[in-house]
Amino acid sequence: MFTEPFMQRALLAALFLSPLCALLGVFVTARRMAFFSDTISHGALAGIALGFWWGLSDPTVPMILFSLLVAGAILWLKENTELLTDTIMALLLSGSVSFGIMVLSLLKGYRGELHRFLFGDLLAVGSREVWTAAALLVVLGGVIFSRLSWLTLLTAHEEMAHVCGIPVRRVNYLFVVALTFTVALSIRLIGIMLVTSLLVIPAATARNLSRNLRQHLIFSVLAGLVGGVGGTLLAYQFDVPCGPMVVLTAIGLFLISLVAGRGRQKSRAI
């Protein structure tokens, strides 16, 4: 298993992207942005469709660019209209998905490629995706930990962060850009339909066990690692799709943490 190059690349990709998603997921769930990441991931479908329309063998670049466009549109509409955030995201999600489906309906011969982006194909990632994931983990992980106090205060109380001199608008935009890049690249890991789960489930698992932010971050990263790497190994072992297996492994960890967390609460009560 571990001597096969495709498996080595798959494990490295899971090792790099899973903890990054879990780390961002702590702030995504705390700021109630799960639907935001879901909108970005589904918006990527339009970018993928455009990439195929333009004849690109790898639509990663248009996928990322269109995801950034969707994210920017969400922020602009939120700041310049009176629409509620969930209304804006539902509008852009349905619009971008419909546009992507219309473009794909005009194309022939891309159903296999589309299936890979919808549901993920971690076992088929190349060396370039692995190195990109490694660079993203190093850069974004470093930025997050260097500005952890900013993100923490901004998540807890945005007005207080502004009073303390934190450039709230700039940090919000940078966080959205980081989240967009991570979501877009993680689509190759578990697919458009499931990518939000890689952000939300490890953070929710950690929430059941943690008592403070430090524990929340550590447990979330560990849950992401175990879910990503463990799900990849199980997918290879049982010859099943990798993306859904990663998600099911993460859900299994969540259920274990739920039981463990409730057991700890009962022991405290006694």
Image (cartoon, rainbow, N blue to C red):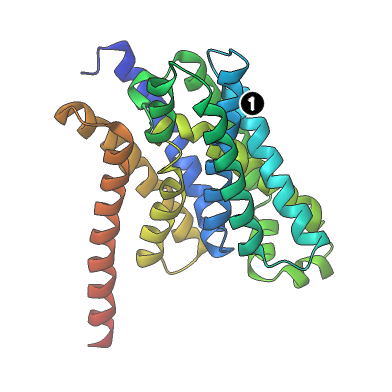
Where in the figure is residue 61, as x and y percent of width and height? 63, 23
Where in the figure is residue 138, as x and y percent of width and height? 58, 32
Where in the figure is residue 163, as x and y percent of width and height? 83, 70
Q: Is residue 185 left or right of residue 82?
A: left
The foreground one among 57 and 36 is 57
Q: Which residue is mark 1?
A: 62
Placement of the N terminus among the 4 image quadrants: top left
Q: Residue at x 80, y 63 (%)?
A: 81
- Count of labels shown? 1
Where in the figure is residue 62, as x and y percent of width and height? 64, 26
Q: Hey, which residue is sitting farthest bottom in the picture? A: 270
Dot 1, crowdedness within 10 Å: few (<14), some or many (≥20)? many
Picture quadrant of residue 141: top right
Picture quadrant of residue 35: bottom right
Can residue 260 be seen here? The reply is: yes
Picture layout, residue 147 above or below residue 101? below
Q: Secondary structure at mark 1?
A: helix
Picture layout, residue 22 above or below residue 260? above
The foreground one among 267 and 262 is 262
Can residue 15 be seen here? The reply is: no
Q: Residue at x 54, y 40 (%)?
A: 183
Picture layout, residue 6 above or below residue 97? above
Q: Residue at x 71, y 39 (%)?
A: 69
Tag 1: residue type? Pro
Q: Is residue 249 left or right of residue 133?
A: left
Q: Hey, which residue is sitting farthest front in the picture? A: 106
Placement of the C terminus among the 4 image quadrants: bottom left
Q: Residue at x 77, y 68 (%)?
A: 82
The foreground one among 242 and 95 is 95
